[in-house]
Amino acid sequence: MSYVNILVEKKVNIGVIKINRPKYLNALNRDTIIELTKAVEELEKDKNIKVVLITGEGKAFIAGADIKQMNEMNPSEAKKFAEMGHKLLMKIEKSRLPFIAAINGYALGGGCEVLMACDIAIACASAKIGQPEINLGIHPGFGGTQRLPRIVGRSTAKYLLFTGEIIKADKALEMGLVDEVVEADKLIERCLEIAKTISSKGPVAVSLCKQAVNQGIELDLIRGENYEVEVFAETFATYDQKEGMKAFTEKREARFEGR
């Protein structure tokens, strides 16, 4: 389908979503969230797609939710808006596809929440990241109060949430909020390199691995291990498992088919 606020491109088996509202620093309004949700659904249905890259046009990844639009909301409208954001990020988190956030600039508020819902986050050295909603008299509404403490720890999350401090990419790396920092001119190249590596692996195993991590981290260790055993066993019902192990014994590259 055609989009107004985003660009969607398919590079062989890699989907690329670019938020394209540079005039507004790619702020998330209702229409952009709806388009992003549809784009995720579209790429999810395409069996040729194995990895998705999300980035922004211009000097921002996503500079937050659209404050001008939020300023006019009553509590009921704010609730619906937050539910839209949660629906989008849950689709990313529960997707069979790995999502890589290519953080090309400001990732604030909703932008930070989007990167946290992705599986891997790579930032350019000049990126600025944070949850500054407290400065507006509100707190995060797209999962920031929930995902941030799970990633950086409770006390660090509270510090960032309470102060609204915007941090540089290198500090975000130290906290584990991003996985790697590169120069701006190498960002997309590096993210595509990672995406190509992942896309060369067995899609079923990658998807089940993502599922095992995301589900298991919410469980205690014993139940998490039991869940891993069940998911591990599922891989042995696939063509890719047979092909992967056969290729290993034959000392050749595996030809995975995602089944």
Image (tube, rainbow, N blue to C red):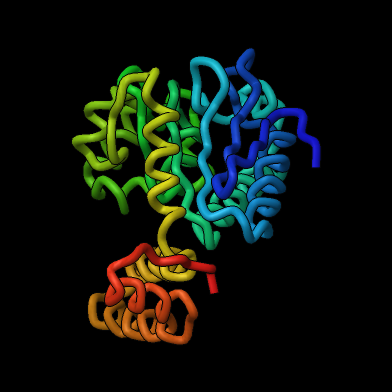
Number of numbered discs on residues: 0
Quarter of the figure that contains the N terminus: top right
- Does 90 sit left or right of 191 as displayed? right
248 vs 1, nearest the viewer: 248
User: Which residue corresponds to the image point at 68% horizontal and 31% vertical from the top-left?
Assistant: 6
The quadrant where residue 3 appears: top right
The quadrant where residue 224 appears: bottom left
190 vs 247, nearest the viewer: 247
Q: Is residue 215 visible?
A: no
Q: Is residue 82 visible?
A: yes
The quadrant where residue 68 appears: top right
Farthest residue, direction top: 23
Q: Position of residue 48 (x, y in %)?
A: 62, 56
**Vertical position of residue 240 compared to residue 146: above or below:** below
**Vertical position of residue 144 compared to residue 67: above or below:** below
Quarter of the figure that contains the C terminus: bottom right
User: Which residue corresponds to the image point at 59% horizontal and 45% vertical from the top-left?
Assistant: 12
User: Which residue corresponds to the image point at 40% horizontal and 78% vertical from the top-left?
Assistant: 241
User: Which residue corresponds to the image point at 45% horizontal and 28% vertical from the top-left?
Assistant: 108
226 vs 97, nearest the viewer: 97
Q: Position of residue 157 (x, y in %)?
A: 29, 42
Q: Position of residue 11 (x, y in %)?
A: 59, 40
**Vertical position of residue 147 compared to residue 208: above or below:** above
- Does 242 sit left or right of 69 as displayed? left
Q: Position of residue 167 (x, y in %)?
A: 30, 24
Farthest residue, direction left: 174
- Does 20 sit left or right of 220 as displayed? right
253 vs 207, nearest the viewer: 253
